[in-house]
Amino acid sequence: MSALREDWQVLCRLFPAGWENLARGTGAVARLRGFDSLDHLFRTLMMHFGYGWSLRETAVQAKLAGIADVSDVTLLNRLRQAEGWLRQLCQQLWKENGVSLEPAVKDRPVRLVDATTVKEPGKTGSQWRVHFSLRLPAMECDAFELTPSQGKNTGERLGRFTFHAGELVIADAGYSHPPGVAEVARQGAYLCVRLNPASMPLLNEQGRPFQLLRVLRGLKRAGDTTEWAVVVPAGAERIAGRICAVRKSEEAIRRAQRRLTLKKQQGKARATSPTRTYACYVLVFTTLPKSQANCRQVLECYRLRWQIELTFKRLKSIIHLGHVPKHDDQSSRAWLYGKLFLALLTQKLVRVGSTISPWGYYLPEETADSQPLA
């Protein structure tokens, strides 16, 4: 237990500066009923996020560890109250990890939509798909929906979100479908989405099929960028937009080709000649007018989305197990921010791991009330 306490204190040194004051300022700890300290409260929440335990099991484990004596209902209320606190902790860690959350397109509301699958522990654990929308740069979750991972109306689609006129929606290739493009346009918003050529038919301005493979041959060097005007047919509608493209570096191309080969060997995908060609580029479809964002700005917008996606990949691959609080949207959003915080903290641990001191932790900053490690 002594080693565990010491590990926790070391970990606390990696938290954003002022994390305790932030808890008080956001109203996360109006009272500490059932907890001896803010430290014990946050440690209990981290147990819930990290181990994937249900709220009831977390309460039991916290009592056994001697850090809390609360019910699962009390812990749920603490989780709800911690939403704003956890969101701001995520914002600070993202900045510390070198990612600016400010979009390349200024003076326009920007939203990022995504979905992730979560499997609860155990052989019979339920599998859920979490659909959510984040506002940038505040990282505020303004839409949250929980569905089963399989079945009707459970997939990734833009039609499940409500958009505001004039805002820019950024999404990955899973949302690259004509109905979604039409829905965003119908609500008066603009779209920036990673293109999936297999699911998004394209026409040229004359209404004929757009020869994407042919025009891509003009991008021969790493970093070459260009754009083409296209039209997306969505039933009777025709949505005008642009394809913004950049050729990847040779190393990035090599990794992409290797992934295609592995998927083919595993029987998960066909590595066709067109697919291998598309893997040499990043292709982004946007309905944002050229007068408001040039090709480079559109690609920079998607680059920001990709930086955030890297964190979600860690969320999915490292800390994907867990009981989603299915009681209400507020507790579910707080759970999402907690998972993100752990993913970002993992990223920071990897970054500082090679430079950590030989005695195994960072020395605390010298203050009048600095305390040595117990």
Image: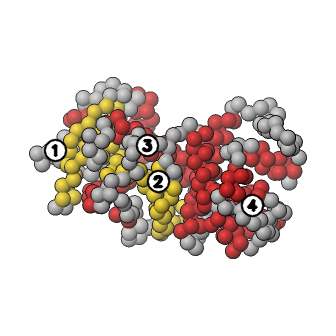
Say what amino acid the circle numbered 1 marks. Answer: Asn
Q: Can you tell which of label 4 and label 1 is closer to the viewer?
A: 4
Spatial distance from mark 3 to mark 2, Cα to Cα? 11 Å
Question: Which badge, 1 or 2, comes first in the chain's sequence?
Answer: 2
Which of the 4 image quadrants contains residue 62?
Answer: bottom right
Secondary structure under tag 2 reads: strand
Callout 3 environment at 10 Å: few (<14), some (14 to 19), or many (20+)? many
Q: Distance between the residues labelled 4 and 1?
A: 58 Å
Please state if 292 lies on the left or on the right of 305 as rendered: left
Location of mark 1 (residue)? 204
Mark 3 or mark 1, earlier in chain: 3
In the rendered image, residue 181, in percent from the top left (x then y), is placed at 29, 56
Secondary element at image label 4:
helix
Residue 94 appearing in the image: yes
Residue under the image location 21 percent in, 35 percent down: 214
Residue denoted by label 2: 135
Q: Residue 115 carries which label?
A: none
Q: In what element is the residue under mark 1? A: loop
Residue 188, position as x, y percentages in the image: 29, 57
Residue mark closest to the camera, 2 vs 4: 2
Work out how far the residue at label 3 is from the one at label 1, CA to CA, in angstroms: 29 Å
Q: Which of marks 3 and 2 is nearer the N terminus?
A: 3
Q: For the point 57% across and 41% down, which residue is it?
A: 95
Label located before the other in sequence (3 or 4): 4
Other residues around mark 4 within 10 Å, as few (<14) / some (14–19) / many (≥20): many
* Residue with the mark numbered 3: 103
| Neighbourhood count class around disc 1 (C-alpha, 10 Å): few under 14, some 14–19, many 20 upward | some
The label number, if any, that marks residue 41 in the structure image = 4
Location of residue 85 in the rendering, given as x and y in whole percent from the top left corner: 63, 56
In the image, what residue occupies the spot 47% across and 55% down? 134
Q: Nearer the viewer, mark 3 or mark 4?
A: 3
**Mark 4 belongs to which amino acid?**
Leu
